Amino acid sequence: MRMGFSLIAAFLILLILAIVSVSVGAVSIPLHEIWPGLLHENSKFFFIVHEVRLPRIIVGILAGFGLAVGGVILQSLVRNPLASPDVIGITKGAGFAAAAVIFLFPKAPAYMLPLAAFVGAFTAFAILLLLSKSLSLTPATFALVGVAVGAFFQAGTQYLIVRNPADINMALLWMSGSLWSRGWNDVHSLLPWIVALLPIVWWNSTKLNIFLLGDETSASLGLNIIRQRFWLLLLAVALAGISVSAVGTIGFIGLISPHIARSIVGNRHKWLIPLSALIGADLMLLGDCLGRTIIIPREVPVGIMSAIIGAPYFVYLLRRARHNRI
């Protein structure tokens, strides 16, 4: 009962945030004008709703789903509550590849940026596998290797910025993470992946539950640890990579969404996965709404707002963990 109520509450919050997101911004749309703006082409807000804010909202929701569920998978497999796509270097690899396109190929077609980010995420994953000896290391060591891989790609990105200061604005916007100027093309590139991958992750919820018991227990229950960890990590990389390719390197969503969901429904992935996805989308839209209203008509990238929202909660988690050890 509690778990079902939590899902309904998270969905209702998402619906409210979506309505608010349509309304707020440089051009404010009264609430009573939202419905006509959605349905009637002769409405003065039709273009803003359909071509500017609606695709932006959908991209934010889908990316929130992908980042949050990617975080669930990583935290369960690594058995580390601090694991997330940005912590183990996946988003850093995507960000480096995107920055390389921006700086080295400034006249490249628009579709090259998300494609490069997607390739960068998988490159970081491949290096992570190579350095961790095909996942034979312990989960804790695997996480540390991921941090090293992320630091390597982050250094590469900073080097590109230092060498190309004239083109820094676009790169900083991408690395901050933003929903600005997202359109229906981004929706079409993101939607099939999220729709295809999320059910696969949910279908593997029992395996994720088993992984929480430890490698020895998982193996005794008949689970092929190396193979299953590989495929589940691949799902996490795909979700994170396609999300980053659409919105840039947004942090904290994949880190704190699973924590919030876990505090409500526990470690049963049958409920943890969908609730984390909804909370991730909630945080994305909340950050975007706040970012568009703080300094109107300018906006603060959603990645910065997610850090402002997520950092205090992250500190709270650390303090609670320290208190529990004491």
Image: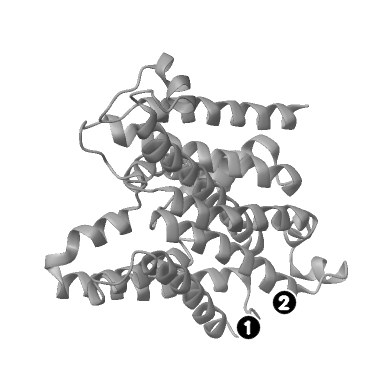
Mark closest to the chain's N terminus, 2 or 1: 1
The residue beneath circle 1 is: 134
What residue do we see at 61% from left, 31% from top? 11
55 or 198, which lies in front? 55
Q: Is residue 58 above or below residue 132?
A: above
Left or right, 93 with respect to 260, comes to left
Question: Which disc, if any, is residue 226?
Answer: 2
Cβ atoms at labels 2 and 1 below 8 Å apart: yes
Q: Is residue 272 visible?
A: yes
185 or 140, which lies in front? 185
* Disc 1: CA contacts within 10 A as few (<14), some (14-19) or many (>=20): few
Snapshot quadrant of residue 203: bottom right
What residue do we see at 27% from left, 27% from top? 27
**What separation in Å lies between label 2 and label 1 (alpha carbons)?**
8 Å
Residue 37: percent from left, percent from top: 42, 25
Q: Amino acid at mark 2?
A: Ile
